[in-house]
């Protein structure tokens, strides 16, 4: 039985690492975002309630989100453990999670915010084939044209500097109390998120293996 949580700021590569961990250890990746979208799409009673919040740009209340997670982790494929991605988001959710189960390990990706801003702001996406470039780390041969298909390269609204900085600020405000909470429980490990995809993954695997003993 292995129960993990992964925390990481926007553009820190959390989704990629969650997928890699899920595959390596055979753990279902329980993503709050995916569960919310699925519940809304299927128009479940919970989904109908949640939609009214999402439509006005609000996070669903803690009790609805906790119920969504509780329903998901009670399914058969979570019997041997799971990886929580995007949960808990608030102290209320963390307290309910403590009542629900014992988490083995919290992996907290730590990256300098200026590096995250640089990563995001320099990202360019091809509007035709969705190829991803970066003006500094992986530049195309021609500044505004995709090397693969010749399509135009654009900066997504999500990658504009003002938007990125706002998302990082919100993440910091939301997550700081949660990180303190888990640090006090002595089950949180900081991961150096500047080490590249493979380097970050190695750190995570080392931390998980220590917990598994």
Image: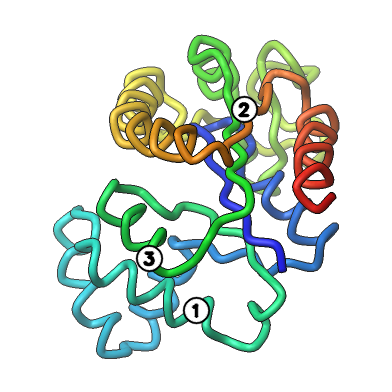
Split into 4 quadrants, where in the image is the N terminus?
Answer: bottom right
Q: Secondary structure at mark 2?
A: strand
- Residue behind mark 3: 99
- Residue behind mark 2: 190
Residue 174 is left or right of residue 123, and the answer is left
In terms of sequence position, does the residue under pointer 1 or pointer 2 come before the other?
A: 1
Residue 188 visible in the picture: yes
Q: Residue at x 47, y 34 (%)?
A: 156
Q: CA distance from mark 1 to mark 2?
A: 27 Å
**Crowd rating for badge 3 (residues with CA inside 10 Å; few <14, some 14–19, many 20+):** few
| Image coords of residue 50 (percent x, y) | 23, 72
| Image coords of residue 5 (percent x, y) | 57, 51
- Residue behind mark 1: 72
**Marks 3, 1: nearer the viewer:** 3
Reply above or below: 141 against 96: above
| Image coords of residue 174 (percent x, y) | 31, 36
- Circles 3, 1 touching at the beta carbon (< 8 Å): no
Q: Nearer the viewer, residue 47 or 140?
A: 47
Q: CA distance from mark 2 to mark 3?
A: 24 Å
In terms of sequence position, does the residue under pointer 3 or pointer 1 come before the other?
A: 1
């Amino acid at each position: 039985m292995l129960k993990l949580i992964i925390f990481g700021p926007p553009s820190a590569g959390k989704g990629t690492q969650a997928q890699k961990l899920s595959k390596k250890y055979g753990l279902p990746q329980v993503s709050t975002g995916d569960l919310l979208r699925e519940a809304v799409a299927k128009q479940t009673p919970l989904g109908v309630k949640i939609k009214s919040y999402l439509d006005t740009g609000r996070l669903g209340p803690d009790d609805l989100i906790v119920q969504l997670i509780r329903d998901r982790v009670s399914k058969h494929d979570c019997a041997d453990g799971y990886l929580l991605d995007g949960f808990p988001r608030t102290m209320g959710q963390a307290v309910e999670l403590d009542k629900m189960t014992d988490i083995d390990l919290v992996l907290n990706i730590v990256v300098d915010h200026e590096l995250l801003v640089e990563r995001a702001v320099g990202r360019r996406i091809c509007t035709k084939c969705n190829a991803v470039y970066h003006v500094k780390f992986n530049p195309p041969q021609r500044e505004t044209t995709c090397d693969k298909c010749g399509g135009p390269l654009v900066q997504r609204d999500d990658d504009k500097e003002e938007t990125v900085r706002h998302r990082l600020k919100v993440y910091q405000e939301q997550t700081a109390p949660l990180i303190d909470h888990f640090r006090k429980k002595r089950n949180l490990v900081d991961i150096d998120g500047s080490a590249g995809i493979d380097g970050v993954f190695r750190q995570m695997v080392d931390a998980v293996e220590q917990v598994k003993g």
